[in-house]
Image: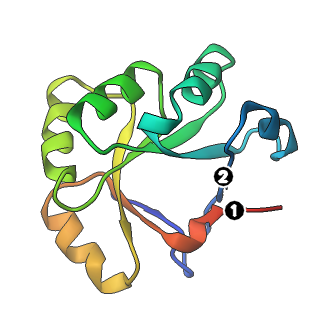
Amino acid sequence: MMIIIGHPDIPFDPLHYVERIEEIAKTPPNSTLWLGPFSGAKAIAKHCFENRIAYTVMAESVRDALLANALHARFILADKTLAPKLQKIAETYLFDAKIIVPVSEESEMEAIAQMGIDGVIFQNAIIFSE
């Protein structure tokens, strides 16, 4: 089943953006956090791993995805060019994290599905402030 997060016709749990560990306490219990690019969020990702907090990051390289998966990211976002490579690696190494591609329009979902990517996320699925 393809993961579709943020589509107006499908119920979803939003991601809650945090920039600092201290902000985690302000998010709803059991929510999934959005940390932004992994390269700038390693410390928060490690904190989430150590405290079993669900989180999502953007991978800008294969190395980012490997490290994020090792730190138990729930979702790893990647652009349309990197996502197919990450999906193949995720399948080879049986990642627990799911590879998802940010989209802005419903029409983009079909191409992502044809690439075999785990899912898509729409911008409105991320809450940037409470």
**What's the amino acid at mark 2?**
Tyr
Q: Mark 2–mark 1 contact, CB under 8 Å?
A: yes
Within 10 Å of the Cα at label 2, are there few (<14), some (14-19), or many (20+) other Cα atoms?
many
Q: Determine the residue located farthest toward the top in the rendered image.
A: 50
Q: Position of residue 14 (x, y in %)?
A: 65, 59
Q: Which image quarter is the N terminus in?
A: bottom left
Q: Quadrant of residue 102?
A: bottom left
Residue 117's x, y, as percent? 23, 54
Q: Is residue 72 visible?
A: yes
| Residue designated by label 2 | 17
Q: Percent from the top left, x then y, of residue 66?
A: 29, 26
Residue behind mark 1 = 128
- Disc 2, SS: strand
Which of 52/23 is in front? 23
Q: In the rendering, which numbered label is found on residue 94?
A: none
Q: Position of residue 23 (x, y in %)?
A: 80, 40
In-front residue for pair 58/74: 58
Q: How is the image coloured?
A: rainbow
Specify the quadrant that holds the C terminus.
bottom right
Residue plotted at (38% across, 84% down): 105
Q: Can residue 74 be seen? A: no
